[in-house]
Amino acid sequence: MRYRVNRVIIRSENAAKPKAQKSKYIADEFKALYPVKTSLDYGCGKLRYLENYLQNSDEVFLYDSQVQLSRQQKIWGDKTSIIEFSKTRNNIALFCGREIYTTQEKFDRIFCINVLSAVPILSVRWRILRNCYRLLKPNGQLVVTHQYRNSDFNRMRKMPNAYEFRDGYIINSLRGHSFYSTFSREELREQLIQCGFYIALTKIFDGTVFYLLDKN
C-alpha cells in the first residue's frame, strides 16, 4: 500500500522481502499449525511464505495493493506477476486494495507477517488488526509476526537519507520513500487484546515476536 505523510508518498511495497529471505524460525512455526480450509495472507508482498501456507490450507487468498499484485517479479522460478500467477492455480485467489475492508468473505486463518512495521499511520496500522478480527470465522486463528529489533534497522536509521518519523523512520532511496518501525512487542500485544483476540502462543526469536491468536 501507499501512504501520504509529510508531503511524501510512502511505498510500503519496498519493505517486502523475497522468498530467499524467509525466516526459518517462522517457517518452522507454520509447520505446526493444524490444517484449515481457507487462509488469508494479509499483505502478501512477494509471497515469501506461500508454500508454507499451502501446506496446511486447502485455499489461500492473497491480499495486497494493485502495485504489488501487478508488478513483475520472480515467483517459483518464473518471471511473472502475482495476478498472472494466481490464474495458473485453482487454490489461490486475490483481494486488491480496499476490497479487503468491504468483503464479506470469512477465513479460518489469517497471516499478518511483518506487515505492521511498514505502516506509518497508526490509525491504519491498528485498523488492520481490527479488520483481521472481522474477517475471521468464529474460532478462527490469526498469526502475527513483528520484528521489533534488528541491527540493520539501527544501521539504516543512521544513514544520511533517513530521518525519524513517529515511532520509526523514513528512508528516501532511488525506489522512493519507505517506512520502518520497531514499535515494541508489548504495544502490539496491547492492541491485539483490545481487538478481542486471545493470545494462545507467544514466541520470541532473533528480535522477532510470533503471536498465535484465537478469535474470542
Image: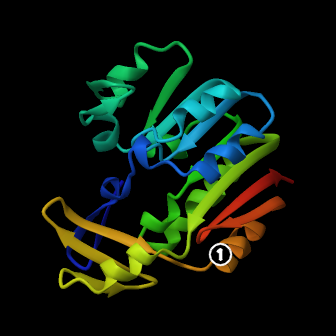
Is residue 23 among the parts visible in the rendering? yes
Q: Amino acid at mark 1?
A: Arg
- Towards the viewer: 45 or 101: 45
Q: Position of residue 208 (x, y in %)?
A: 60, 66
* Disc 1: which residue: 185
Q: Position of residue 80 (x, y in %)?
A: 27, 25
Q: Secondary structure at mark 1?
A: helix
Tell me which residue sits at (31%, 78%) in the image: 156
Residue 176, quarter of picture: bottom left
199 left or right of 131 in image: right
Q: 215 above or below 104?
A: below
Q: Position of residue 189 (x, y in %)?
A: 72, 72
Image quarter in which the C terminus is found: bottom right
20 left or right of 2 in image: right
Tell me which residue sits at (78%, 29%) in the image: 35
Q: 179 above or below 43?
A: below
